[in-house]
Amino acid sequence: MANQSKWLTVAEASKLSGYHPERIRELINDGKIVAQKFSIVWQVDRDSLMAYLSKMQELGKKRGPKPKN
C-alpha cells in the first residue's frame, strides 16, 4: 500500500505554521504547498507544508543581519 500523507485543514495548517489562514490559502493558490479539495473543504498535505516551512527557515538563515559599516 502506498504511503498516505496526512491531510490538514487550513485551520490546522495555520496553527502548525503560525501563518494566518489567508496566507495558507495564498500558498495553495500560488502552488507553493500541495492541497486538495475534499467536498467543500481544502486539505493541505502535511509533508508539503513542512517542506515549505523548512525552506523558508533556511532562506531566513541565509539573509541574516546586515553587516554594520
Image (cartoon, rainbow, N blue to C red):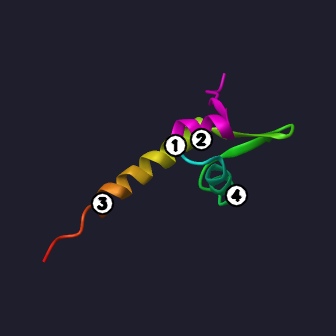
Three-letter residue code for mark 4:
Asn
Split into 4 quadrants, where in the image is the N terminus? top right
Which dot marks residue 62?
Answer: 3
- Front label number (2 vs 3): 2
Asked if the residue under mark 3 is in contact with the one under mark 4, i.e. CB atoms within 8 Å, the reply is no
Where disc 3 sits, the SS reads helix
Q: Residue at x 62, y 31 (%)?
A: 5
Label 2 sits on residue: 14
Which dot marks residue 29?
Answer: 4
Q: Residue at x 70, y 57 (%)?
A: 29
Which dot marks residue 18?
Answer: 1
Between marks 4 and 3, how big is the CA–CA gap?
Answer: 26 Å
Where disc 1 sits, the SS reads loop
- Front label number (1 vs 3): 1
Between marks 4 and 1, how big is the CA–CA gap?
Answer: 18 Å
Between marks 2 and 3, how big is the CA–CA gap?
Answer: 24 Å
Asked if the residue under mark 1 is in contact with the one under mark 2, i.e. CB atoms within 8 Å, the reply is yes
